[in-house]
Amino acid sequence: MSLSKETILKVISNVTEDIEIYEHRGQLSLTVPKDKIVEVAEALKNDASTLFNHLVDITAIDWLKPENRFDVVYFVNSLEYNFKLRLKVKVDETDLTCPTVTNVWPSANWYERETFDMYGVKFEGHPGLRRFYMPEDFNDPETGESLHPLRKDFPLMGIPGTLPLPPYPEKYGDTKD
């Protein structure tokens, strides 16, 4: 059995007609409206013709542009049909929220927490959204604003007065006095 792009689009079109399609080297990426991501995920998981029952990962891409700065990206597999799919939603910095898909794929819990911690995207309805890697008080010492280290506007050398950087002997020589 194989799964085709047309089958996937047919399942999604029952939820929304607003779909952007991108294919590169045999990999399919679909961008859907943010407010439809949960319904699209449920349809793709529960429809017998697709069965996307395995959520591999969730992450974000920071494009550092004025509109739709972030993409939240869902990597899903249909184990039954051996098909990989990338779902995307655009998220604007002025409304840095996205609905949670933890009710569709329970493993989204950790992936959404990681994406929140690294990029600052808040997943509405998440059962326990909190930082994953960074301390809860990882804030800018001057403004008190929450910091997210994978954003493109995060300082490359870190925030002065917060976590120290490890020694870098390759650049500065032996740091032992």
Image (spheres, grey):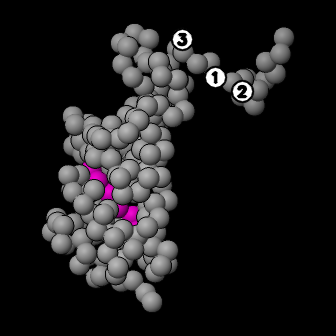
* Residue 36 makes an appearance in the image: yes
- For this orientation, the residue located farthest to the right is 177
Q: Which mark is residue 137?
A: none
Q: Amino acid at mark 3?
A: Gly
Residue bearing the label numbered 3: 161
Is any atom of residue 5 visible in this view? no
**Left or right of 99 in this view: 57:** right
**Which quadrant of the rendered structure holds the C terminus?**
top right
* Secondary structure mostly seen in the magenta stretch: strand
Near-viewer residue (37 or 46): 46
- Contact, mark 1 vs mark 3 (Cβ under 8 Å): no
Q: Residue at x 39, y 23 (%)?
A: 146
Q: Which mark is residue 168?
A: 2
Q: Residue furthest left?
A: 17
Secondary structure under badge 1?
A: loop
Query: Which numbered disc flags the more N-terminal residue, 3 or 2?
Result: 3
Residues in magenta, as a range:
85-90
* Crowd rating for badge 1 (residues with CA inside 10 Å; few <14, some 14–19, many 20+): few
Residue 110 among those drawn in magenta: no
Q: Are marks 1 and 2 in contact (CB under 8 Å)?
A: yes
Could you say where residue 127 lies in the image, as x and y percent from the top left? 38, 39
Q: Residues within 10 Å of mark 2 (few under 14, many from 20)?
A: few
In the image, is residue 45 above or below residue 129?
A: below
Quarter the N terminus occupies: bottom left
